[in-house]
Image (cartoon, helix red, strand yellow):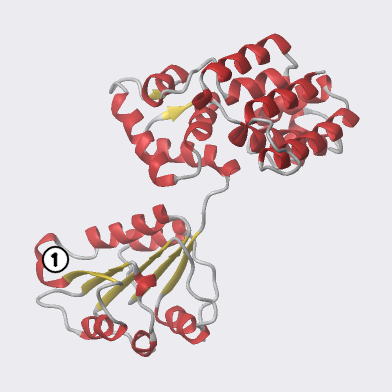
Amino acid sequence: MAETKIVTFDSLMRELREGKYRPVYYLHGEESYYIDKIADYIAEHALQPEERDFNQTILFGSDVTASQVADAARRYPMMAERQVIIVKEAQNIKNTEALEKYMKQPSPTTVLVMCHKNGKIDGRKREYVKAIQQAGVLFESVKLRERDLPAFIERYLSSKQASIDPKSTQLIADAIGADLSRLTSELDKVLISLPENDKRVTPQVVEDQIGVSKDFNGFELRDAIVNRNIFKANQIMNYFDKNPKAGSIYSFLPMMFSYFQNLMLAYYAPKKTQEGVAEWLELRTPWAAKDYMTGMRNYTGMKVMQIVGKIREIDAKSKGLDNPNTPPGELMKELIFFILH
């Protein structure tokens, strides 16, 4: 019977670190970062260095057929416990019949890793999917949501024995976005810059290494809006006018929509304490509810509903709907003015 349990990146990596290898790994999805991490780990750890020359093979889906992959997988390892075959660009293998047949009876001495990036396996190939699940692991690598980026950044730095404050976390998330390969590359660059005796990532470090102003950025603009600080908000908007790359409506709108949507929900929290609001909004810590407590003091429930509607309107206009020629910068100013007045 096919295995239907959802496999997560953490559970899969935990199994690999324990030295447990399955005959087949089919790695597919929109997020290439996790696919690369799993495939690279298997390539580096499933065999001893001296075993790799004869027992590790890298193939490309555009250069091989399903029959060739299946034949290679049926070979016996040479003077090793197993062989590893990694197929990159597996989505380019069109006729998968021979692979489906192989997966119904895979070789116990082969670890076959199929890497299918920037998309998912064709859902119409039900028998092929079923065969993969019976043989080993079908792992979907899903794009990380914007709201989950801060937690990812904190975990990544913590795994490298470094710490980061919430402001710096948000600065990096806003500046880099959800491209995890680029994000981890930037974080590695930050880590290299830290002195051995002080592994803290601060706003100044972020400004120096990533080029994000610690004073004029989306995080500070959000803070100015939360606190209804009109002067500071206008300062930041003027900075954005002169430095368009520092902040755009396309990164700002999702951040503000998320905040005001949660703020609207906060009014319905059974307990209006910081702890009660944090629990109601399912925030990670009571500290994370601080801005919502401030927001409830500075904005009425009716105003928040109007703001959410305005954000939707500006979002549509930024995509060209009922907006023939107003530039994004002017739309952003229109929204800020509406929120603060």
Q: Quadrant of residue 319?
A: top right
Residue at image point 34% right, 88% down: 98
The spot of residue 96 in percent (x, y) is 38, 84
Residue at image point 28% right, 74% down: 111
66 and 144: which one is in front? Answer: 66
Quarter of the image that includes the C terminus: top right
Residue at the extreme right: 302
Which residue is denoted by mark 1 in the rendering?
52
Q: Quadrant of residue 312?
A: top right
Element at badge 1? Answer: helix
Query: Please, is residue 178 above or below residue 171 in the view?
Result: below
| Position of residue 112 in the picture relative to residue 340 (left or right) | left
| Position of residue 261 in the picture relative to residue 212 (left or right) | right
The spot of residue 268 in percent (x, y) is 86, 38
327 and 163: which one is in front? Answer: 327
Residue at the extreme top: 231
66 and 81: which one is in front? Answer: 66
The spot of residue 182 in percent (x, y) is 39, 41
Q: How many circles with numbers are drawn on the protein?
A: 1
Residue at image point 68% right, 27% down: 332
Query: Please, is residue 297 above or below residue 137 in the view?
Result: above
Tell me which amino acid carries mark 1. Answer: Arg
The spot of residue 235 in percent (x, y) is 62, 11
| Position of residue 109 in the picture relative to residue 261 (left or right) | left
Q: Residues within 10 Å of mark 1 (few under 14, many from 20)?
A: some
Q: Quadrant of residue 170?
A: top right
Residue at image point 54% right, 71% down: 5
Query: Please, is residue 10 above or below residue 233 in the view?
Result: below
